[in-house]
Amino acid sequence: MTGPDAPVPAGEVLRRLDELTDLFRRRLQDDRDKRRLIERLDERLSQAEAGPFRQYLHPFVNGMALVLDRLDRYRGPDPEFVASVREELLQLLGMHGVTEVPVSGPFDPACHEAVDVREAPGAPPGTILEVHSRGFAHGSWVFRPARVVVAAARQNPAGDDQPPAP
């Protein structure tokens, strides 16, 4: 008997199944290779795009930061005007994805620079006490770290830096 309803020998079925299994494995591996290649190309493209962007934005942000520092130190007769100019400059930076580094909470060496460490009764060690100059970042990339004063670790009566035993 020949045709579509004819029985296929078991050996032939196993051979065809092995061929299909092999084909499936090769295509699956090919798909994985393509996915890894696409991920690597996407990463390289992101790095290539970010490089010139940051290269040109960095001097602009640093210059704006210096202007903002001067505005923060202004003690003249028209503080409202200065505050409005400062806010406009921050909005302009924000339109380009640049944000101020947060300065509330604990010290983070990735985005803060400690300019001084002081005793601060009641403040947990590592807490930011004062901001000397604001920091600016674009996503996780920090253009300029915030320069801050940090609370010192409490010293026990023995004089070492270990916290007193409870």
Image (cartoon, rainbow, N blue to C red):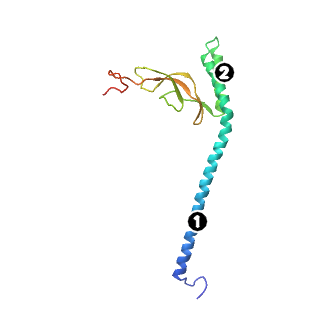
Q: Quadrant of the C terminus?
A: top left
Image position of 108 with respect to 115: above or below: below
Q: Amino acid at mark 1?
A: Arg
Q: Quadrant of the N terminus?
A: bottom right
- Choose top left, top right, bottom left or bottom right for residue 19: bottom right
Q: Position of residue 119 (x, y in %)?
A: 42, 20
Let me know if residue 86 appears in the view.
no
Mark 1 to mark 2: distance in Å? Answer: 62 Å
Q: Nearer the viewer, residue 96 or 27?
A: 27
- Choose top left, top right, bottom left or bottom right for residue 65: top right
Image position of 36 with respect to 12: above or below: above
Residue drawn at the location 35% of the way across and 21% of the way down: 159
- What residue occupies the far bottom of the structure in this picture? 1
- Choose top left, top right, bottom left or bottom right for residue 47: top right
- Which mark's residue is nearer the viewer, 1 or 2? 1
Q: Position of residue 89 (x, y in %)?
A: 66, 25
Q: Nearer the viewer, residue 90 or 21?
A: 21
Find residue 26 and name its label. Answer: 1
The residue pinned by badge 2 equals: 85
Q: Is residue 146 left or right of residue 63?
A: left
Residue density around tag 1, few if under 14, some if 14–19, many if 20 or more, within 10 Å: few
Q: Amino acid at mark 2?
A: Val
Q: Position of residue 114 (x, y in %)?
A: 51, 25
Find residue 130 and name its label. Answer: none
Let me know if residue 12 appears in the view.
yes
Residue drawn at the location 50% of the way across and 27% of the way down: 104
Q: Secondary structure at mark 2?
A: helix
